[in-house]
Image (cartoon, rainbow, N blue to C red):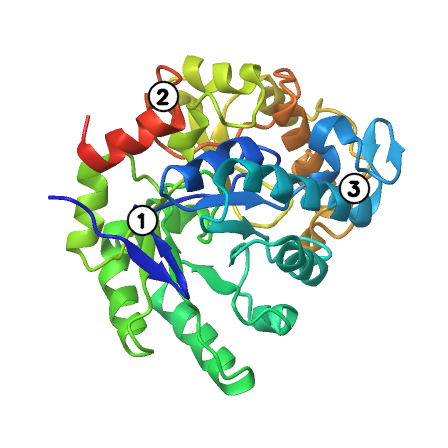
Amino acid sequence: MSFKPVKIGKYEIEKPIIQGGMGLGISWDGLSGNVSKEGGLGVLSSVGTGYYQDKKFSKKLAFGRPVDAESFGSREGLFEIVKNARKICGDKPLAMNVLYAINDYGRLVTESCEAGVDIIITGAGLPMNMPEFTADYPDVALVPIVSSAKALKLICKRWSKRYKRLPDAVILEGPLSGGHQGFTYEQCEMEEFQLENLVEPVVEEAKNWGDIPVFPAGGIWDKDDIQKMIDLGASGVQMATRFIGTHECDADQRFKQVLLDCEEKDIELLKSPVGYPARGIRTNLLDLVDKREGPPIKCISNCVFPCERGKEAREVGLCVADRLADAYEGHTETGLFFTGTNGWKINELISVKELMDKLMNGE
């Protein structure tokens, strides 16, 4: 059975696969531009654009890191990333993921629109005021990430009442995804919160608001998984981790090697300054953090507001911005390597084109 194209706002996605936005720097122009080129929806990450091209667009550096939110989320870096992605994918639909928990959220959403992306995707919190920052860009489609039907209902009620608009699609992220979760540690293990049990209630809620397309995410690996989600009523899926195993992924080769080398037992939930559990790979960094011997926490970049300027980072023993940046740059001793539960299945690097063909046609 072949998969059908799907519309998100005014944009048609030829192959109903959204490549999940991965920050810091894992899905920038190289990966996302090629996913869009191959008919999926490439999703750039707005996290840490001050690190792009060896930090050349960061206004101010300290200890080799962008200083404060304005440099960490560099406007110039963001524009350059979008420009270079467009060189690859042309006028095909291209998205930007902007975390709701990030400092300067509104600025980064508006600048993403100015830079020319077609779709904004937001998770890491309920983006109740997301339409506020795109008012001058009515053609830009808005896609919140939720973890329940209740969350979707809350967003739709607020958006329809305050902004006279609704989400153009919704991503439903289950507890097997990489990075930060929308669940407690306990919920991540509970049957009722597993993705396959969340899809139908969210699809039903989406129908109440005009049949909003639903894209489940978290733990989806192959064509059979995609078909399973579509059979449950989804319009397509979002996948992130598997795209790390591509030549075009923007991460350092040493980052990719960490995934190639990891085993299933190495992937676990860990504490994060954001206040939610995060899924990543057990590496030297986490061993150091457990012993409270991790790298010093300086809060140079002031990345996410729940961290309270380093207060929560000191509680858990790591600065998420610095450690994700180290991973992006391939510093394996101090990097934080996020992955979904299936990251251990990556055993070779292939092209985005090869991966998209596998996902559409089967192995």
Circle 3 SS class: loop
In percent of the image, x 46 and y 53: which residue is there? 182
Res. 310 visible in picture = no
Q: Upstream in the sequence, badge 3 or badge 2?
A: 3
Q: Upstream in the sequence, badge 1 or badge 2?
A: 1
In percent of the image, x 71 and y 28: which residue is there? 53
Q: Amino acid type of disc 1?
A: Glu
Residue for badge 3: 301
**Taking 335 as reference, is 126 above or below it?**
below
Res. 44 visible in picture = yes
In percent of the image, x 36 and y 21: which residue is there? 346
Residue contact at pointers 1 and 3, CB within 8 angstroms: no
**Disc 1 versus disc 3: distance between alpha carbons?**
38 Å
**Disc 3 versus disc 2: distance between alpha carbons?**
32 Å
Graded by Cα atoms within 10 Å as few (under 14), some (14 to 19) or many (20 or more), the crowding at tag 1 reads: some
Q: Amino acid type of disc 2?
A: Ile
Q: Quadrant of residue 169?
A: bottom left
Circle 2 SS class: loop
Tell which residue pokes out farthest to the bottom in this image. Answer: 161
Circle 1 SS class: loop
Residue contact at pointers 3 and 2, CB within 8 angstroms: no
Q: Quadrant of residue 154?
A: bottom left
Q: Upstream in the sequence, badge 1 or badge 3?
A: 1
Residue for badge 2: 346
Give percent across and percent down for residue 290: 61, 26
Residue for badge 1: 14
Task: Kindly report which numbered mark, 1 or 2, lies closer to the viewer in this rendering.
Answer: 1
**Taking 139 as reference, is 272 above or below it?**
above
Q: Amino acid type of disc 3?
A: Ser
Give percent across and percent down for residue 236: 28, 51
**Disc 1 versus disc 2: distance between alpha carbons?**
25 Å
**Taking 53 as reference, is 154 above or below it?**
below
